[in-house]
Image: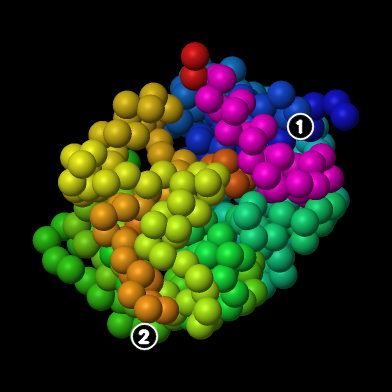
Amino acid sequence: MSSVRVAINGFGTIGKRVARAIQAQPDMSVSGVTKTGPSHGCGLAQRLNLPLYCTSDDLEDIAAFEKGGYNVEGGLSDLLANSDIVIDCAPGKMGQSNHQKYVDAGIKHIFQGGEKHSLTGLSYTSSANHKENIDAKGTRVVSCNTTGLARTLIPLRDATGELSVECTMIRRAADPGDSRKGPINAIAPVLKVPSHHGPDLMTVAGGIGITSLAVAVPTTIMHVHSIVVELPGGHGMTTDSVLDLWAKTPRVISMSGSIDKIPSTAEVMEMARDIGRPWGDLHEIFVWTDGASLDGNTLRYFQAIHQESDVIPENVDAVRALMGMEHDWRASVEITDSSIAASLV
Ligand code: NAD
């Protein structure tokens, strides 16, 4: 199959990362990225040789780019006409109006976790439901939190059977590049109890009953999940066999807080910077081996989520599913991850 042309509508925190991950793939290319108007992000698009378009078709909006000193190829309609699929990376809850534009243009589309499942009626996580997404018209890559839950819980469900899960999400207040959000000196519980975060997993995976609580804390670098899982009776697992299972699971990294000297998210992110991906990203979910314990049927563990990047390779796999390019999720994950790794050397 010839290279699939991928448009990226919205070139912010997620959009710029998705663009670089797509650029690294052998079977797809970036047809263009959009910005709402001139800003430093336009300069990044130019440095990465990404054709730049305006999010609207309004001629005044398009002309503003030239006034700001940036070359622009046209509006969103022009980009969609030159593309096979679009990945929507606009801020959350903008999906409804963008969705209509994609439907009108007759183009396949992928949304992000800031949108509701009902927008497309289909969601995506590689390990959960790649097959269900094959040849679909549109989908939504689930949020960073849901992606993290899927990575560690789906292999457990597959190894043991139906799970009952209670998760507390300790959430970063804002992304590092965001000066608008908080708290900066408070701990803010989400008072809608239970929170919406955990149950979102049920949009991609059956056999996992889950509820969650969430609390925002003054950090920008990661979320931490504190998870309690009731395994089915007769599960036959031990703490070590659970850790072995995760060690064999793609996009999960497990290390010891005490032996590897990685006791908090600060050291996890330093380790991520050592890997050398752009922006110091960590696509993998991080599990502390010495923070996991199975007692009877009850498994307790902590995991850390790099909120800006765990969904990035999932978007690449979602393109392969919707375009019918690879039916096996493990094969897609292998192509995605090895191509990103090769692009770093
Ligand atoms: P962002 O604010 O960093 O970037 C959004 C970009 O879209 C900006 O460049 C903005 O100018 C542009 N934009 C504004 N209006 C637009 C429109 N109508 N059409 C297209 N683009 C438009 O946001 P983000 O953090 O990249 O989030 C994008 C999506 O990804 C959201 O659904 C969010 O919930 C989801 N998500 C974010 C994170 C995270 O940690 N940042 C993690 C997982 C999922």
Which color mode does the image show? rainbow
**Which mark is on residue 5?**
1
Q: Amino acid at mark 2?
A: Val
Q: Earlier in the sequence, mark 1 or mark 2?
A: 1
Outermost top residue: 345
Is residue 340 shown above or below 124? above
Label 2's element?
loop
Q: Position of residue 208 (x, y in %)?
A: 56, 76
Outermost right residue: 1
Q: Amino acid at mark 1?
A: Arg
Which of label 1 and label 2 is nearer to you? Answer: 2
Residue 292 quadrant = bottom left
Label 1's element?
strand
Is residue 180 shown above or below 278? below
Q: Is residue 332 magenta?
A: yes
Residue 284 quadrant = top left
Magenta segment range?
316-343
Residue that carries the numbered disc 2 in the rendered image: 193
Question: Which secondary structure dominates the residues rendered in magenta?
Answer: helix
Q: Residue at x 55, y 19 (%)?
A: 343
How crowded pointer 2 is (Cα within 10 Å; few <14, some 14-19, many 20+) is rated as few
Left-right relation of 234 to 221 = right
Q: Position of residue 217 (x, y in %)?
A: 22, 62
Q: Position of residue 157 (x, y in %)?
A: 57, 69
How crowded pointer 1 is (Cα within 10 Å; few <14, some 14-19, many 20+) is rated as some
Q: Is residue 321 magenta?
A: yes
